[in-house]
Image (spheres, grey):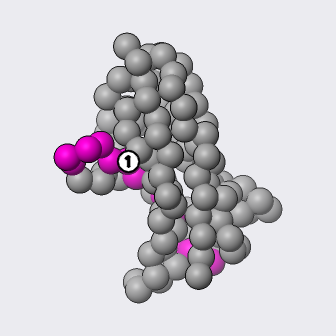
Amino acid sequence: QVQLVESGGDLVQAGGSLRLSCAVSRSIFSFISMGWYRQVPGKQRELVATFTRGGSTNYADSVKGRFTFSRDYAKNTMYLQMNSLKPEDTAVYYCNARLNSREDYWGQGTQVTVSS
């Protein structure tokens, strides 16, 4: 069983920055894709950023130029650097790691709240 543990969520003012971390319990070389998603109450979970083993990173249009996905293979950790935060970025953020088509793992979520 693979475990993902997020951290870094907080309350921040608009225009501020946060860095989310997601520690993974096995080598992140193993995964065909990794990424971050977010969800607000009453809405579907939405993609924020994904990274595939082929090396491509995709971002939601709403976060392009403000958020950056990165990973540290030595620490088996992925990150989401969030700059120029807006109130509409308020959500629970989840990290995801897909091992194959049948094994998809999620963290427990971390709350990000951006005040105006």
Name above or below for residue 51 compared with residue 53.
above
Q: Position of residue 7 (x, y in %)?
A: 61, 46
Q: Is residue 74 visible?
A: yes
Q: Residue at x 65, y 65 (%)?
A: 24
Q: In which quarter of the image is the N terminus?
A: bottom right
Task: Decide if residue 3 is on the left or right side of residue 76.
Answer: left
Picture quadrant where residue 4 is located: bottom right
Q: Where is residue 116 in the image (x, y as percent from the top left)?
A: 37, 13
Q: Residue at x 47, y 40 (%)?
A: 111
Name above or below for residue 20 compared with residue 34.
above
Q: Where is residue 18 in the image (x, y as percent from the top left)?
A: 57, 31
Q: Which residue is drawn at 51% across and 26% down?
A: 11
* Amino acid type, callout 1: Arg
Name above or below for residue 4 compared with residue 68.
below
Secondary structure under tag 1 reads: strand
Picture quadrant where residue 26 is located: bottom right
Q: Is residue 36 visible?
A: no
Give the number of callouts.
1
The magenta-colored residue range is 30-43
Q: Which residue lies furthest to the right in this view?
A: 74
Q: Residue at x 37, y 39 (%)?
A: 91
Is residue 72 a member of the stretch shown in magenta?
no
Residue receiving disc 1: 38
Q: Which residue lies furthest to the top in this view?
A: 116
Q: Which residue lies furthest to the left in this view?
A: 42
Q: Position of residue 94 (x, y in %)?
A: 46, 53
Report crowding for label 1: few under 14, some 14 to 19, many 20 or more residues within 10 A (C-alpha).
Answer: many
